[in-house]
Amino acid sequence: MQSPSHESRPDANRSMEKSAYWFADGNVILQAGDRGFRIHTSLLSRHSVFFRELFELPQTSPEMIDGCVVVQVHDPPGDIEILLSALYDGCTFNVGAKNRLPFSTVACLIRLGHKYQMESILTGAISRLKTCFPALYADACMLRNRRSSYMSFKDEDAVAVVNLARLTQTGIVLPGALFVCALLPNELLLHGVPRGDGTMERLAPEDIVRCLNGRECLVRAARTRFEWLLLEDMYTSDDCSQEEECQPAMERMAKDIARQGLLSNIDFLNVMLAGQHETNNMCVSCRQMLDDDDNNVCVYIWSNLPEYMGVPVKDWGKPDAQDVPIES
């Protein structure tokens, strides 16, 4: 990590774009690129071990503007603005506030919270991240919808989620994040996803291998899920009230599922049976039987997701699931 610097510079009085965080009573200026942030050392020191220790160092001929020490930081100006928004306008960013933030904002807070040792910022941002990558199957709809009450994300964001999880040792989000990565087109999986600053967010080679291996496991799981389609005689519910109609309906449904390619669709959270059997006029009892059987298989697939994706998580799928040390 490149440390901020405050050495003497010959161009101390050069023009600097003032950011929205330029306070008349501020006593330090953070400079990111050509943008300046005149803020308060007391606030930074309170929240950041890094800056507290930096400000305690003796300063020899520091760069000064308007009587304030200038500290160069090597981060995009927009990222620093997001971080300061969290510090100065904390109620907006607090995980207890049900305002949904985009993943890009949460990712910025995790990266800078980790870099500058801001425990409250880091903890709050990771808590938001976890709401979208849960351990419980009952909460897996967050992955299906790509959002929770606290954060939204796109499939390609999962690449950065994996890298942030490894940076912060937040292993509990890895099975879900690697699962979403496995759904990405090969080009994005192998070559990475463009960041806002033009650089590429890439998975480590080992995680690419995990995704490819996970795909194979999930394809086998998808076939197991629909193995009832291969039965010679479709069975109906014990309480079926119209067997002569439900059995042919199941056969039509089986053909529809096969025709739509669902037998090899690994996104098991988004392949739902409800729309299939509703259009095939089954009785309520047979619909419920299929839904219950299918849900049980999906719970089983979910319970094995860490194994499929090659990342162990203690008590995965249980309320007391917890992070474990991440292995390379």
Image (cartoon, rainbow, N blue to C red):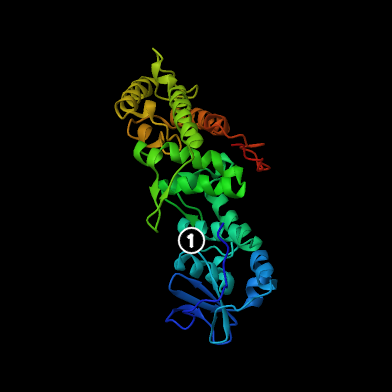
Image point 40% across, 39% down: which residue? 189
Pick the residue in front: 290 or 298: 298
Which amino acid is tagged 1?
Thr
Q: How many marks?
A: 1
Q: Position of residue 180 (x, y in %)?
A: 45, 41
SS at circle 1: helix
**Residue 192 placement, left or right of 51:** left
Q: Is residue 216 above or below residue 36?
A: above
Pick the residue in front: 209 or 255: 209
Image point 34% across, 31% down: which residue? 281
Image point 37% across, 20% down: which residue? 247
Which image quarter: residue 166? top right
Find the residue positioned furthest to the left: 259
**Residue 322 placement, left or right of 187:** right
Q: Is residue 55 above or below residue 250?
A: below
Q: Position of residue 199 (x, y in %)?
A: 40, 53
Q: Position of residue 204 (x, y in %)?
A: 49, 40
Label 1: few (<14), some (14–19) or many (≥20) C-alpha neighbours in 10 Å: some
Q: Position of residue 219 (x, y in %)?
A: 43, 26
Which image quarter: residue 49? bottom right
Pick the residue in front: 61 or 243: 61
**Residue 9 placement, left or right of 188:** right
Pick the residue in front: 147 or 326: 326
Q: Quadrant of the C terminus?
A: top right
Identify residue for label 1: 105
Find the residue positioned furthest to the top: 232
Q: Quadrant of the N terminus?
A: bottom right
